[in-house]
Amino acid sequence: MAVIAAAVAVAILTGLAVLQVCVAAGAPWGRFVWGGRHRVLPRRLRIGSAVSVLLYAVFAAILLARAGVLPGCTSPVVVVATWVLFGYFALGILMNLASRSPAERWTMAPACVVLAVLTAVVALS
């Protein structure tokens, strides 16, 4: 079950990474990210989006490691990192629900809910 949960989470993270790459490159989808205030992100938020892509890769590696796909599933660092990741996604639910952007509320909050549940499944494995 943990492998399936991790695979689905990685697929969602990949989709989010594609979105972040697009907005970092200037796509007019800024209403979905960073509070939704900008149609096209300013330079500082584009940099933030690029950094987000790297973070999503780290998140994916943590989940895959904890699920046993990558080495280190019982490492204390991986176990703790998985729970920290769960907390991050849980906080993300609240942050995205508080967004002034309806697009962000209706897309990112549900994505964080699914990611939090999937991460909990992986963490509990």
Image: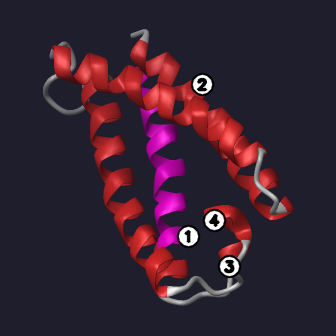
Q: What residue does disc 3 label? A: 29
- Between 6 and 31, the residue placed more toward the observer is 31
Check if mark 4's residue and mark 1's residue have beta carbons within 8 Å: yes
Badge number at residue 19 = 1
Marks 4 and 3 in Cβ contact (< 8 Å): yes
What element does badge 2 sit on? Answer: helix
Image location of residue 73, percent across then percent down: 21, 19
Inspect the image, locate mark 1, and give the three-letter code of the amino acid beneath it: Leu
User: How many labels, in total?
Assistant: 4
Count neighbours of disc 1 (C-alpha within 10 A) and say few if under 14, some if 14 to 19, many if 20 or more.
some
Coloration of the structure image = secondary structure
Near mark 3 (Cα within 10 A), the count class, few <14, some 14-19 or many ≥20, is some
The kind of residue on which mark 2 rests is Val
Dot 3: element: loop
Tell me the residue that label 2 is attached to. Answer: 117
Residue at label 4?
33
Badge 1 or badge 3: first in the primary sequence: 1
Q: Are marks 1 and 3 in contact (CB under 8 Å)?
A: yes
The residue shown at (55%, 79%) is 23
Look at the picture and state if 57 lies above or below 62: below
**Disc 4 element:** loop
Question: Compared to 70, does 52 lie above or below?
Answer: below
